[in-house]
Image: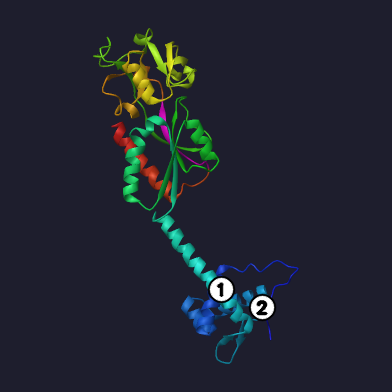
Amino acid sequence: MPILHASPTSAAPHASPGLYEVFLRVARLASFTAAARSLGYTQSAVSRQIQTLEDEWGTALFDRLPRGVRLTEAGRILLPHAEAVGERLRAARAELDALRTLGAGRLRIGSFATADAALLPRTLAVFRTRHPAVEVTRTEGLSAGHLALLASGDLDLAVVAATSGEPPRDCTPHHLLDERMYVALPLGHQFAGRADLRLAELADEVWITGGARPEDTLLGSALARGFRPREGLFAADWIAKQGFVAAGLGVTLVPALAASSARADLVLVPLRPEDTPRRRVYAATPLGIAPSPAASAFLTLLKETAAALAS
């Protein structure tokens, strides 16, 4: 009597999962012809696939009878394992369908501080309403760090800023908006009532900057054009910058994305367009890799939110 076996000196068979689906259909219907009809195959195609599976396992799985077929002993041993394969495949298809339709899945996003003031929260609120089953995690920090996480596969999408005038590298950039810049002044400042300002008018002001190297901050492109601010305190935290300005310790740049969350005891005056430091905001996705369904949906919403904020 033939038995199911694998040679101890050879690798286990690697039959295609589709072969097991054919095997199960033949086992249930006890007929190559009936199985072929139900699957939409020809009888010879089913016969060839069963023969392939038998060759893989090195034993007959069906006895060929004058009318139909029946499982051999080896076929009866294989049957529950094939059913388990079928169950796993059905579960996998259901999960993949859920992923495709955003009925499941995950989304890992990163963003810089001022994008968290309005752009990201508004987008995320709509996304969660439309796709509540998608698990969203968020990382905060600098754009350079987010791009590194994106390249290593630890983020699916990052909202990043570029002040060089060039799109970020080592990713697929999706332009969202160009930010207008404001100068945050304390109440009662001599320029508080102005409709706009030139940087040259602020040369004697003490500046609150985001780091010890102004060229790495929002003032970077203005420095490249010859502007030389009086350096004051350094504050990477947006709340701290506002506090120092409100206390009369200096002035600072406020990008448009953060303008809506500025303190009430500050005055924001826009810079003239020709003096505005360049900052372009992008959504970045992994280079050379198609975004996941969740990332694609979030990217679409980001563009819509960015367009609304820009207008």
Amino acid under label 2?
A: Leu
Q: Position of residue 93 (x, y in %)?
A: 47, 63
Q: Residue at x 36, y 27 (%)?
A: 179
| Number of dots carrying numbers | 2
Magenta span: predominant SS is strand
For residue 242, what is the image quadrant?
top left
Of residue 85 and residue 292, the one placed in the foreground of this image is 85
Q: Is residue 56 left or right of residue 111?
A: right
* Residue 220 within the segment the image draws in magenta: no
Q: Residue at x 59, y 90 (%)?
A: 65
| Magenta-tinted stretch | 279-287
Mark 1 lies on residue? 82
Quarter placement of the C terminus: top left
Q: Residue at x 31, y 48 (%)?
A: 129
Mark 2 lies on residue? 4
Quarter placement of the N terminus: bottom right
For marks 2 and 1, give the CA distance: 13 Å
Q: Is residue 113 left or right of residue 44?
A: left
Amino acid under label 1?
A: Ala
- Whether residue 66 appears in this view of the structure is yes
Of residue 135 and residue 298, the one placed in the foreground of this image is 135
For residue 208, what is the image quadrant?
top left
- Whether residue 274 appears in this view of the structure is no
